[in-house]
Amino acid sequence: MTAGTAPRWGSALDSVVVYAQGAVCRRLARGSVPPGGRVRVTGLPRTLDAGSLRVRVTGGKGPRVIEARVDVEAEPLGTTVPDASHSEVERLREECAAARARHDRQVRLIDEVKALRPVPPTRRRDDPHRRTPVDAWLALADFVDERLTRLHSRLAESQEALGRAEHALTVAADRLARASTDAPAAHVRTTVSALVTFDGAGDAEGQAGVEVEYAVPGAIWAPAYRLTHRQGESSGRLVLRASIAQRTGEDWTGVRLALATADLGRRTDLPRLRSLRIGRRQPGPTPSGWREPPSGLADLFAGYDAAGRRPTVTHAAGGAEGRPVPVAVAVAGAPAPPLPPMTMPMPIPMAPQGYDQPLTAAPPGYGAPPPAPMAGSAAPQAFGGGSRFPASSAAMAPPAMPAAPGRAAPPRPPAPAPAGSGPTGQAGPPRPSGSELDYTALVLSGPEEQHARRGRLFPDVPFDPTAAEYRRRAESVAALPLPAHAVRPRESAGSFDHRFDAVARADIPSDGTWHTVTVGEIAVGLRTEYLCVPSVEQTVYATLALSNATGQALLAGPVEVTAGQDFLLTAALPTLAPGGVCRVGLGQAEGVRVTRRTNLHESTSGLRNTTTVLDHRIHVELANRLAEPVTVEVRERVPVSSDADVRIEERADWAPPRTDADAEQHAPGTRVWRVELPAGATTALDGGYEIRIPSAKSLAGGNRRS
């Protein structure tokens, strides 16, 4: 069974995990397994990363997947009605161009009429002076004024028509830009599918189910919250919401959604620590999966070169992603040389038969980049031979090709240097890179290639401009401006990664705009506190002390605070670790008043009045006008001295701030009063401190300071 005749299985998008940039989608498909074992799972987007395709059998029992690769099909659409949005934009663009042409024509007519001037005839030397025809001049002026009046009225109408056409074109273009990209092109239908090959039959009914997983770019998200609380309660409802924008080329309809802060492009392979050895004896190089090319490889194309002409080349499927492999056709009359054993592309990354050593580098997989090529390499290495790595024998160099009739003999390619003779001086067998160990991406070079590439396998990674354009459009969603107070997940998550699963399925179109989705409810502890710093501002502020009682961190983002049914404000919530506490400001509390008065008394003490005593007295009054008791935290400060001769004595019942996570935010010398005020009650707080300094010294700026 060929790829073109493989039965098609329709797939449905089931779940999506949105990462910091990009997403991983999972589709489900089910159908009957044909005798050949090859099926085509359709419905994949054009922007998918071909290297991230993963296929697994669902249900636990059934056939085994032995190969999966991406295949792209395109067919023209001759009778399909074009998209209405594109047609509307084209129609409005033509109308706008016609309106602009009419406007420009009126401007040119006005310029031509303005240029009308009376030109007197040229006077000869012997001609007498003529009388100026005033009536003709006035008639011309009246004609110009009347003509300009009509033209300017038409110009105003054309300007209004042009403005309306440009506005309509702008609206239609914006609607088209915001439209979903999950739609085929106007003239070509592109079908992206996964060619899956099974090893075995389905269940008793011949059915089998698969789960197709792939990564796509063009998806971002940012966290947002909604906090609902009631006065006097110690708990509240914190709803986690996510602002998601995606332009992956497929609409996410009814999908199970999850949000992660991880980076899809981050390396996942661990570094390899090697031992340090002192001395001449060093361990041998790690064996690789490379082997020398078969003997007599160059003789395979002797008849082709002796024919003296280029026959037509047929193509047989077998390359990666359905790309054809060029194979030479034997020329009539030319002897067919015996075929030596050659390495052919294999469907899955496993070591081919005949290898003497096991592989040391795995094929490049999703999430793990391929190993870096060896230093000093210049050209891509053919799998099974090579001009890239030094060889261990001269047998790698192909012999000279016989000359064709009427032509000079082709030049003999230079033989590769023996092992250890290169500039790097590395001995041992070559080490192929990850791309050369990806057997499904290797393509057999035909006779039309260079002599050093004939009959050898090389990685074939052609550039697809259409796929590159799709990916560029998808990745443009990363340039969207973030909502107010929003922070990107990678910046707020720090060095840890978190995942949040939505409680319900969601719909997110592929239009590149922000959509808000409710993820779930988070249990948090709330405590209403009132803070004031009367030495700076005699105003009391209300705050919410929010504690994270879950095992996951709360990422930074905007939070909408609601008290009962009343919306209060939108604030910025910082990143809150599990068990952490932070304050969210609610603004001024009009029901709680504070008043502060200070008094300074200066005196001397000591046997000879050698010490100056600065006695500072502080009086703070609090009044609660609310209908419920409140807890007020009053913050004051005392001087801090680094001079041993200066002594500071406190006379108050205040205390230093609590030694918690917020203690680092307080300046040295901060003192705190915590007062419980019943409803409608008032209280007074008295405190102070004495500064004792030698009489020969004084405070910078004067001793009499508040």
Image: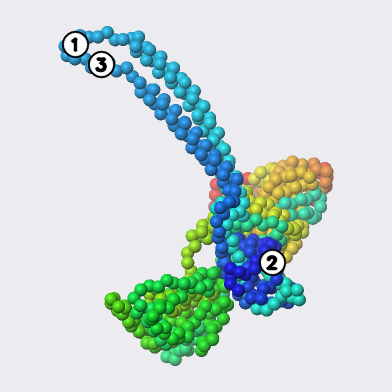
The answer for how far apart the CA atoms under marks 1 and 3 are is: 11 Å
Q: Secondary structure at mark 3?
A: loop
Name the residue furthest left. Answer: 126
Q: Amino acid at mark 1?
A: Asp
Residue 168 percent coordinates (x, y): 57, 38
Left or right: 223, with 93 as reference point: right
Q: Residues within 10 Å of mark 1 (few under 14, many from 20)?
A: few
Could you tell me if residue 65 is visible in this image? no
**Residue at image point 45% right, 85% down:** 339
| Residue at image mark 3 | 121
Residue 99 visible in image: yes
| Label of residue 29 in the image | 2
Above or below 378: residue 102: above
Name the residue: 27% across, 8% down.
Answer: 131
Examine the rendered structure and indicate whether residue 506 appears above or below residue 210. above
Read off the residue under disc 1: 127
Up-down relation of residue 250 to residue 37 (above or below): above
In three-dimensional space, the C-alpha distance between marks 2 and 1, rounded to whole angstroms, equals 103 Å
Quadrant the C terminus occupies: top right
Front residue of 290 and 442: 442
Which disc number belongs to residue 534? none
